[in-house]
Every structure is written in C-alpha cells, then in structure tokens.
Image (tube, rainbow, N blue to C red):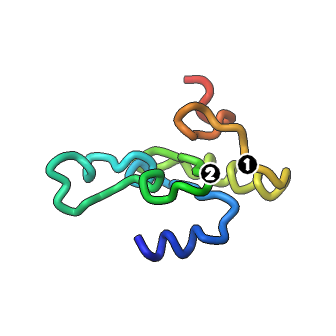
Amino acid sequence: IDQLKESAENAKAIIAWGSCATNGCVQSAKPNPTEATPINKIIKNKPIINVPGCPPIGEVMAGVIVHVIAFGKLPELDRLGRPKAFYAKR
C-alpha cells in the first residue's frame, strides 16, 4: 500500500489494471484474510481509470495510454470509471 501511495503521489491519474485492482475481485470477499482492497478505496485524490478483466484486455490498456499521450487528457469514463471507448456498448 505504501508503494502504491508513493507511486500515485505525482501521477496524473491511476490506471487500475485488472479485476483485482478495479474491484478487489474474489480475494476481497469476506472473510478477506489478506485484506485485499481495490485501488479506489486506497487512492482518493486522483482520477482512477478502471480496466477490469482477468486477464484485462491489452488493447484497452494500450488505448488508454495512447489517448493520454496523444490528447494530453484522460479518456471519457463511464459510471464505473471504465474508458467509454471500450466499455460503452456490449
């Protein structure tokens, strides 16, 4: 957790990569002996881009990074914090 907080300190945003990072997945279910926690419950002062999946889709990660680099801003997100370009339709 300390490494995550230190890494996030000067970041423009956080990309939560995978279901464990985005929602805690099955590891965070009760009784949760490992205290698994999704990133959004730890980092509160930065935008978080959720890329769920187990495994997550590589093209989505590449698309998010390219969008930030090319446009200098974060992609538009849906209500779950996922990039709309990839998660707006089924």
Q: CA distance from mark 1 to mark 2?
A: 9 Å
Looking at the image, residue 63 sits to the left or right of residue 30; the answer is right
Percent across and percent down for residue 63 are 69, 49
Residue 9 vs residue 81, the one in the foreground: 9
The part of the image, by quadrant, that contains residue 83 is top right
Residue indicated by mark 2: 47
- Quadrant of image for the C terminus: top right
Q: Amino acid at mark 2?
A: Pro
Q: Residue visible at 45% across and 56% down?
A: 39
Percent across and percent down for residue 33 are 17, 60
Secondary structure beneath dot 2 equals loop
79 is higher (above) or lower (below) than 31: above
Q: Within 10 angstroms of label 1, few (less than 14), some, or many (20 or more) residues?
A: some
Q: Residue visible at 47% across and 45% down?
A: 52
Q: Are marks 1 and 2 in contact (CB under 8 Å)?
A: yes
Q: Residue visible at 52% across and 35% down?
A: 80
Percent across and percent down for residue 55 are 43, 50
Residue indicated by mark 1: 74
Q: Residue furthest right?
A: 71
